[in-house]
């Protein structure tokens, strides 16, 4: 037996040793799927398969680099550098550059990120004299993106009756014309957006049989990570590439399919067994991450989904603590509870800040947690902020570099043509655009050939000469040398350096960091196994294809992480807080009327649960402000799907002062109960279940709110009889704090919307 097989469990070994024919590895959360995938690649190579004949596709560059490194370490040689491992977008970009002439593109085509693409959309909407508030760039871009990921080109889009009806109902009847103009503009600019890297790859394989035969012949074995996250285009490309040998290995977990909003379809993995005959199915159900209690909760929750591949996660780890279910009065109380629990765990069990993550359904929920963490002096980081490469000064610098590599790139030319200021105004730019459209020429052709276009300007001529001089450096100089020259001779770096404000200093430091990254790129050995390519074009492709996960390079910083559950996929933490478990928030109100949407919300909850290694807290608030109004909440239906035996229930928020919280540890809870007997009664009531529903009095008639005062006894149709403790706010937004007793506790109610009967 090979040494690398010794650390595998029985099912992992089956997955690794299977060689020929299709195989689906259903890898539960924390079951060691990366280990299996990399060991399988190593085993194929050790069995005589040439590394050049293996294609492995991932969703992040970080995962691809880790896989290649592990294979190289396992085999003890450098042959792994010949593997075709990368993200779908990076691998397909590499192929498309080699085959660009077949599609009419230059092989140095620009890759537009989402901001670049939205800029093109915005220009087209303006040129078509459309209302940019109605045809918002982000909405139009997302619509085009969805079409491409579903393999719908502009012609099909405009002919599809259902699509046209959808656009008509949304009062956007010219969406198809915008899509068509957008596609033409990108082609004219020698540019592809992210979605084009999939869509054009599909076009290449379907319209050029010789290209299909070439890559079918090259890739004898294909492995796909996170298969549950693939979309229609990725599925179709994989089917074509693997059609000759059918040695396709997909690894994924249908229970973690949470990206339908990006076009991913869980059906790809659910129907894999129908796509191929004699499919080998291996289930990895042993979890190496979490306690058994956490897994029991995860299994019970996901078991409520009907559309799934059944599996039961188990572990040889400890049973672990019960899951804390914390109900709070308000979202601010929820924030205080979480901050207190983190502090307590640090004192009791010596956890670090980086051991904790706070996971929420929407980014808007972060406020109360940020405020509470700041008050407690707990350092934190919001994951998912503006990425380094999206900052204006960085994009300005990169725009110069992109134009030098691809002078057809109109969007980036417009960005830099008058930055730093060189006397080329908005009117001149618009005149050039009009002339380019009249002549059916590119922006660059118009400004670089004044005798043809009739547009003469010393400022334009100076700009063209500068770009041409930089272009002469491309063949002889590496990426850093060209980039350094750009910063020096354009005056870009000097302008930032001369801005001595705090913001100006930060911008200057950012461009210096950009230059540092280019320098590092030119001095780092290439791992592709091919000739070293330290050109500017190679660098630009690399950074353009970075994903959000690849840009999070401070994972070891000692800070609490705050993030959406979508952003947390693939991560793990000793302690996890899953917050905001309320109906209409989690699950989202938009998912309540469709089973497929609701099941995806449940999968999202499953992903959140399985991020936790040792301790898990689930919290919800009775009320929170949403869209400027105080909203009363019902607990999420997902809470009801957790067996009571696995829960340690607690409650906080009765008084204005934050109560002591235990996070499920008995002694401190008992001390709190001793000081506050009413809390003990309430906790006992909660543990026993929800209070019996109130039946309104036969003479119930709601009274006018103007006559209500502190101290009055009132009746609420749902919560029963209570006493008004406080009334706050102005005439139109009076909020009453009413004690409804141990059944419901103190609730804050907006009097203008409540129906209350004055009892006495």
Image: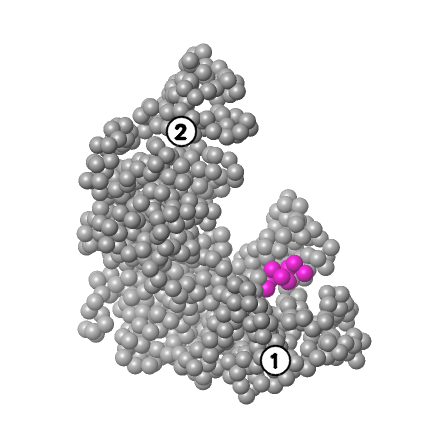
Residue furthest front in the image: 500
Find numbered disc 2 in the image and state the secondary structure of the residue it sits on. strand
Give the main secondary structure, helix, strand or loop, of the magenta stretch. Answer: helix
Mark-to-mark CA distance, 1 and 2: 66 Å
Give 583 or 221, whichever is nearer the viewer: 583
Residue visible at 28% across and 58% down in the picture: 31
Q: Residue 333, relative to residue 176: is it above or below? A: above
Residue visible at 46% across and 74% down in the picture: 517
Which quadrant holds the N terminus? Answer: bottom left
Classify mark 1: residues with Cα within 10 Å, few (<14), some (14-19) or many (20+).
Answer: few
Which mark is first along the chain, 2 or 1? 1
Cβ–Cβ below 8 Å for labels 1 and 2? no
From the viewer's perspective, is 557 left or right of 230? left
Assess whether residue 122 is covered by the magenta stretch.
yes
Residue 48 location (% of width, % of height): 31, 79
Give 343 or 427, whichever is nearer the viewer: 343
Q: Quadrant of residue 36?
A: bottom left
Residue to which mark 1 is pinned: 489
Residue visible at 73% across and 76% down in the picture: 459
Residue to which mark 2 is pinned: 747
Residue 424 location (% of width, % of height): 72, 71
Residue furthest top in the image: 699
Residue 759 location (% of width, % of height): 42, 14
Give 752 or 120, whichever is nearer the viewer: 752
Residue 621 location (% of width, % of height): 39, 37
Residue 741 in view here: yes
Find numbered disc 1 in the image and state the secondary structure of the residue it sits on. helix
Magenta part of the chain: 116-123
Residue visible at 24% across and 50% down in the picture: 347
């Amino acid at each position: 037996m090979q040494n690398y097989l010794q650390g595998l469990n029985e099912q992992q070994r089956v997955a690794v040793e299977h060689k020929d024919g299709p195989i689906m590895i259903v890898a539960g959360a924390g079951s060691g799927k990366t280990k299996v995938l990399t060991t399988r690649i190593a085993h194929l190579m050790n069995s005589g398969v040439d590394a050049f004949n293996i294609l492995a596709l991932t969703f992040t560059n970080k995962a691809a680099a880790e896989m290649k490194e592990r294979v190289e370490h396992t085999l003890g040689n450098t042959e792994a550098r010949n593997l075709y491992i990368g993200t779908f977008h990076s691998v397909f970009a590499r192929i498309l550059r080699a085959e660009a002439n077949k599609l009419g593109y230059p092989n140095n085509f620009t890759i537009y990120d989402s901001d670049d693409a939205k800029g093109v959309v915005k220009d087209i909407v303006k040129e078509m004299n459309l209302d940019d508030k109605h045809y918002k760039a982000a909405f139009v871009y997302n619509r085009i993106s969805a079409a491409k990921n579903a393999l719908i080109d502009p012609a099909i889009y405009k002919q599809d009756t259902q699509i046209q009806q959808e656009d008509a109902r949304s009062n956007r009847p010219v969406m198809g014309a915008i899509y068509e103009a957008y596609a033409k503009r990108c082609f004219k600019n020698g540019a592809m957006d992210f979605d084009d890297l999939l869509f054009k790859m599909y076009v290449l394989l379907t319209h050029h049989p010789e290209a299909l035969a070439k890559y079918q012949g090259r890739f004898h074995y294909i492995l796909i990570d996170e298969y549950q996250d693939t979309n229609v285009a990725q599925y179709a490309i994989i089917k074509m590439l693997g059609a000759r040998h059918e040695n396709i290995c997909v690894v994924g977990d249908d229970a973690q399919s949470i990206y339908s909003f990006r076009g991913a379809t869980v059906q790809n993995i659910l129907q894999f067994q129908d796509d191929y005959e004699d499919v080998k199915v291996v289930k990895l159900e042993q979890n190496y991450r979490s306690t058994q209690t956490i897994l029991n909760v995860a299994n019970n929750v996901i078991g409520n989904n009907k559309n799934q591949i059944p599996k039961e996660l188990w572990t040889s780890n400890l049973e672990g603590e019960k899951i804390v279910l914390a109900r709070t009065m308000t979202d601010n109380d929820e924030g205080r509870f979480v901050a207190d629990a983190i502090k307590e765990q640090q004192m009791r069990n010596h956890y670090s800040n980086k051991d904790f993550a706070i996971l929420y359904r929407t980014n808007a929920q972060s406020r109360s947690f940020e405020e509470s963490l700041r008050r407690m002096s707990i350092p934190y980081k919001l994951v998912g902020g503006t990425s380094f490469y999206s900052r204006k000064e960085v994009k300005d610098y990169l725009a110069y570099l992109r134009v030098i590599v691809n002078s057809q790139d109109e969007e980036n030319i417009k960005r830099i043509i008058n930055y730093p200021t060189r006397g080329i105004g908005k009117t001149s730019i618009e005149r050039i655009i009009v002339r380019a459209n009249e002549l059916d020429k590119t922006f660059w052709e118009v400004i670089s050939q004044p005798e043809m276009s009739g547009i003469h300007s010393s400022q334009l001529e100076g700009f063209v000469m500068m770009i041409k001089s930089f272009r002469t450096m491309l063949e002889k100089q590496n990426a850093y040398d060209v980039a350094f020259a750009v910063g020096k001779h354009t005056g870009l770096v000097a302008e930032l350096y001369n801005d001595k404000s705090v913001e100006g200093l930060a911008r200057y430091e950012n461009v210096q960091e950009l230059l540092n990254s280019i320098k590092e790129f030119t001095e780092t050995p290439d791992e592709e196994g091919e000739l070293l390519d330290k050109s500017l074009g190679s660098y630009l492709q690399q950074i353009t294809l970075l994903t959000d996960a690849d840009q999070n390079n401070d994972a070891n910083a000692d800070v609490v992480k705050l993030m959406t559950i979508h952003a947390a996929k693939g991560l793990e933490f000793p302690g996890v807080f899953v917050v905001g478990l309320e109906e209409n928030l989690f699950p989202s109100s938009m998912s309540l009327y469709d089973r497929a949407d609701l099941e995806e919300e449940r999968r999202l909850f499953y992903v959140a649960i399985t991020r936790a290694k040792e301790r898990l807290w689930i919290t919800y608030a009775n009320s929170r402000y949403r869209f400027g109004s105080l909203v009363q909440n019902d607990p999420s239906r997902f809470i009801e799907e957790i067996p009571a035996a696995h829960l340690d229930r607690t409650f906080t928020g009765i008084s204005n002062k934050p109560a002591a919280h235990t996070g499920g540890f008995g002694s401190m809870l008992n001390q709190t109960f001793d000081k506050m007997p009413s809390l003990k009664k309430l906790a006992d009531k909660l543990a026993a279940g929800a209070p019996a529903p109130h039946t309104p009095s036969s003479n119930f008639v709601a009274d006018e709110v103007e006559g209500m005062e502190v101290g009055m006894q009132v009746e609420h149709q749902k919560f029963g009889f209570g006493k008004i403790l406080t009334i706050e706010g102005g005439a139109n937004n009076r909020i009453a704090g009413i004690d409804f007793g141990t059944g419901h506790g103190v609730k804050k109610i907006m009097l203008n919307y409540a129906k209350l009967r004055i009892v006495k």
